[in-house]
Amino acid sequence: MMCAQESLLLNVFIRANRTVQSTLIMLVFTLFFVSHSQSTLALELDDEAPNFKLPKLESSGELELNNYRGIVVYVDFWASWCGPCRLSLPVLSELREKYFAKGFEVMAINLDENIDEALDFLKQYPVSYPAIRDENSVTPNLYGVRGMPTGYLIDRQGNIHKVHEGFKKSDAKRLEQEIVTLLDKGM
């Protein structure tokens, strides 16, 4: 039997708006993911980025990271319940459009268990770059992802240049500077 305090807490949670619920779910997921991560790989800057081959989210086929050697790649881990992803995906789309011709690509790895939630999210926040899917969360373990969103800026040789955890609007300018620095190195 539930005591009055437990009942009150349950009612408050149930009545919480979707944003608060999303934030709580993100926090619980992050804490669970960090505490249960089986990753023994601690990636550091200048390490070779682990290769992956994952199915496309919105169409058939697969994408493999090693096929992008020779260009600068931003690998972005995201999910539909991730609040900061609502900010990062559109910014990454703009950066991709701006620098694609100079050799920059974004690969967005979705970690939603339910593909429909990921597809609905992309309808609200469309992107100009490939979205791929890792429903078994193998890739975030390879990369040591600790929270959402997490991005890895990879140089033309396939090495990790920068790791970016979380996202806020003020991060966009700094990220763009890092991308331009890597693009300029290859010219």
Image (tube, rainbow, N blue to C red):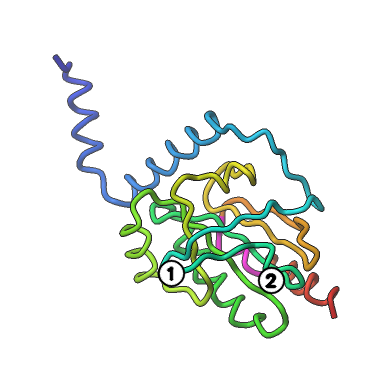
**In this picture, which residue range is highlighted in magenta?**
167-173
The N terminus lies in quadrant: top left
Q: Name the residue under label 2.
A: 176
Residue 168 within the segment the image draws in magenta: yes
Q: What element carries label 2?
A: helix
Q: What residue type is labelled 2?
A: Glu
Q: Nearer the viewer, residue 140 or 18?
A: 140
Residue 34: x and y in percent read 55, 34
Circle 1 residue: 60
How far apart, in angstroms, are the residues tagged by discs 1 and 2? 30 Å
Please rate how many residues cluster around mark 2, counting C-alpha atoms within 10 Å: few if below 14, some from 14 to 19, many from 20. Answer: some
Q: Which residue is drawn at 48% across and 52% down?
A: 134
Quadrant location, the C terminus: bottom right
Is residue 117 magenta-colored? no
> Which amino acid type is marked by label 1?
Ser
The tag earlier along the polypeptide, 1 or 2, is 1
Residue situated in front as seen by the camera: 171 or 76 = 76
From the image, state whether disc 1 or disc 2 is nearer to you: 1
- Determine whether, in the image, residue 176 is placed left or right of residue 186: left
| Helix, strand or loop status at disc 1 | loop
What residue do we see at 42% from left, 73% from top?
A: 126
